[in-house]
């Protein structure tokens, strides 16, 4: 086991403390559970500290996969979790854009994780639900194996009886589908592995609000990936998510996350306007977030110029092409005027203690000023 470990020049690789990496990998293979656990904790800081990849990262992955294939290894769910962290960091670096050297590092790490696909799948019958959950998490990042993974998930989902694992499965399928949205329509049409009723059946059969929310999100993402946004069940999924956003008894961070998700997945701002803002029955914090989402979708603030912020593609994909602040009347399109009118009518917005949108977007501080601006435009 771990052949070739000593042939790598660990001391020449950049990392937190590369000289101890080979010893930590050997310690993970220890028959003593405590020794293995401690080594895993220390290794994580040397290959993926605070979601940052090191030069050691791609070299460590094959040995971690090898350890998974040994029946005597302790803490396999934690080994898988570390691989999952590396998968998340590498795919994020590749998709978000980074320096050439770091991109090469991320690609090497990703490819080595991908090479362990058959090993991960072979462990899916393990009785430990935490281990199965970590496997499905990793699979959700392996977008190049999109069809193979979806086929595997559809075959194994029906045998899964643990709700937390089911939740992870749904999240992983959504992640794969979201990745496919970045492909050309030609390539998407060649993907025939989608199961139309996968999310719909989950939504209808599982009495868990958290899983139902994920299933509704999945219905929207799948509709975007393969068409069918006008289908009745997709509309029902949209309305379900909107009802959850406006449900004041639901956990607040979850409501905000759902709001941002819904905004990313639809260009139909009237959906957000008519069914959220104009209800006038939601709390101030969510009102603030709704207004921010709407403003971001139809106005491009000058934060980039002022602070040098870089906005990722996933956040800007539906932004208007024209730049400018609200105070520039030439930039008040009908779409933007619709948003401003909704804000004008939103009682909760004008109860906010501070109008932070004045600085970033030029939104007037008073209703009277906003009314005048709309009428002038």
Image (cartoon, helix red, strand yellow):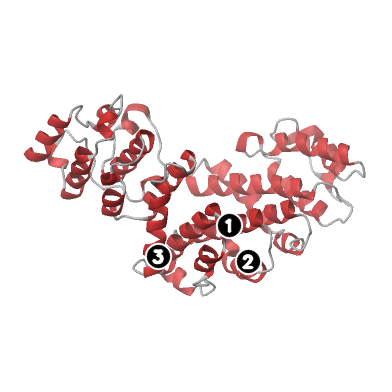
- Residue contact between numbered discs 1 and 3, judged by CB atoms under 8 Å: no
Could you tell which of marks 1 and 2 lies nearer the N-terminus?
2
Q: How many marks?
A: 3
Q: Is residue 78 left or right of residue 150?
A: right
Q: Secondary structure at mark 2?
A: helix
User: Which residue is nearer to you in this view: 276 or 89?
Assistant: 276
Q: Residue at x 68, y 58 (%)?
A: 162
Mark identifier at residue 153: 2
Residue 196 appears at what percent x and percent y? Answer: 49, 72
Residue 270 appears at what percent x and percent y? Answer: 26, 53
Question: Which residue is most to the right?
Answer: 31
Could you tell which of marks 2 and 3 lies nearer the N-terminus?
2
Mark identifier at residue 234: 3
Mark identifier at residue 172: 1
Q: Residue at x 70, y 59 (%)?
A: 115
Residue 153 appears at what percent x and percent y? Answer: 63, 66
Q: Residue at x 21, y 35 (%)?
A: 325
Q: Secondary structure at mark 3?
A: helix
């Amino acid at each position: 086991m771990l052949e070739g470990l000593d042939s790598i020049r660990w001391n020449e690789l950049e990392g937190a403390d590369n000289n101890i990496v080979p010893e930590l990998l050997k310690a993970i293979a220890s028959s003593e559970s405590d020794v293995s656990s401690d080594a895993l904790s220390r290794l994580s800081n040397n290959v993926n500290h605070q979601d940052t990849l090191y030069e050691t990262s791609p070299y460590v992955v094959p040995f971690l996969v090898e350890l998974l294939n040994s029946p005597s290894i302790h803490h396999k769910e934690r080994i898988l979790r570390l691989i999952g962290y590396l998968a998340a960091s590498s795919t994020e670096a590749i998709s978000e854009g980074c320096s050439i050297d770091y991109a090469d590092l991320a690609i090497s790490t990703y490819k080595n994780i991908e090479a362990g696909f058959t090993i991960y799948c072979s462990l899916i019958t393990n009785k430990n639900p935490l281990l199965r959950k970590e496997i499905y998490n990793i699979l959700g990042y392996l977008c190049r194996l999109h069809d193979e993974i979806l086929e595997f998930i559809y075959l194994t989902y029906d045998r899964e009886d643990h709700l937390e694992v089911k939740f992870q499965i749904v999240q992983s399928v959504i992640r794969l589908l979201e990745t496919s949205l970045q492909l050309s329509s030609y390539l998407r049409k060649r993907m025939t592995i989608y199961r139309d009723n996968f999310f719909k059946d989950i939504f209808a059969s599982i009495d868990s609000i958290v899983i139902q929310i994920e299933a509704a999100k999945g219905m929207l993402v799948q509709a975007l990936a393969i068409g069918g946004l006008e289908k009745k069940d997709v509309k029902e999924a949209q309305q379900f998510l909107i009802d959850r956003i406006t449900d004041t008894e639901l956990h607040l961070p979850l409501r905000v996350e759902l709001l941002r998700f819904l905004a990313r997945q639809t260009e139909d701002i009237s959906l957000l306007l008519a069914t959220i803002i104009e209800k006038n029955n939601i709390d101030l914090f969510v009102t603030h977030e709704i207004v921010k989402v709407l403003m971001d979708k139809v106005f491009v603030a000058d934060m980039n110029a002022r602070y040098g912020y870089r906005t990722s593609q996933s956040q800007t994909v539906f932004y208007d092409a024209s730049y400018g602040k609200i105070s520039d009347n030439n930039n008040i399109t009908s779409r933007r005027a619709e948003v401003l009118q909704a804000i004008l009518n939103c009682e909760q917005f004008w109860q906010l203690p501070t109008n932070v949108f004045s600085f970033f977007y030029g939104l007037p501080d008073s209703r009277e000023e906003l009314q005048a601006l709309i009428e002038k435009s």
